[in-house]
Amino acid sequence: MTQMANTPKPPYYAVIFTSLASEIDDSYVETSNQMLALAQQMSGYLGVESARQDLGITVSYWRDLESIKQWKNHKEHLAAQQIGKQKWYSSYAVRIAKVERDYEF
């Protein structure tokens, strides 16, 4: 079952990763699962939401910009980023936004 992230009351930050895949294989799925498990252990991690069709969108939520910086520069995440550039993605974009307000149904 897919569920939405349970984020705290704003403000917090969202890292929006959009991608076009060039090759999705078992190693991609395995690495993606490993990165999720690793991110969940990081200080400041709040949750994640992800969807993939032709365009992949993953939004991870973080307490502050320092937490995002530590995640971006984590050695295992850096290695996965390199493989992604070389093998899995034809293009991607990363956007970081401060969430000032949220509401849900």
Image (cartoon, rainbow, N blue to C red):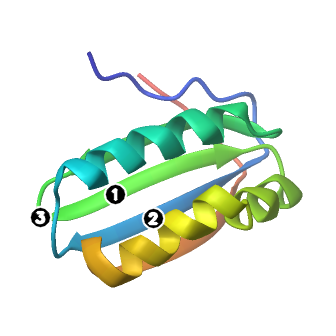
Task: For marks 2 and 1, give the CA distance.
Answer: 6 Å
Task: Say if residue 91 shows up in the picture.
Answer: no
Q: Amino acid at mark 3?
A: Asp
**Which mark, residue 46?**
none
Within the image, what quadrant is residue 90 found in?
bottom left
**Which mark, residue 54?**
3
For label 1, the crowd category at 10 Å Cα-Cα, with few meaning under 14, some 14 to 19 and many 20 or more, is some
Q: Secondary structure at mark 3?
A: loop
Q: Measured from the top left, where is residue 66 in percent x and y? A: 88, 59
Q: Measured from the top left, where is residue 10 in percent x and y? A: 76, 39
Q: Which residue is mark 1?
A: 57
**Which mark, residue 17?**
2
For label 3, the crowd category at 10 Å Cα-Cα, with few meaning under 14, some 14 to 19 and many 20 or more, is few
Task: For marks 1 and 3, give the CA distance.
Answer: 10 Å
Looking at the image, the residue that sits furthest to the right is 66
The reply, left or right, for residue 91 in relation to residue 46 is left
Q: Measured from the top left, where is residue 78 in percent x and y? A: 61, 69
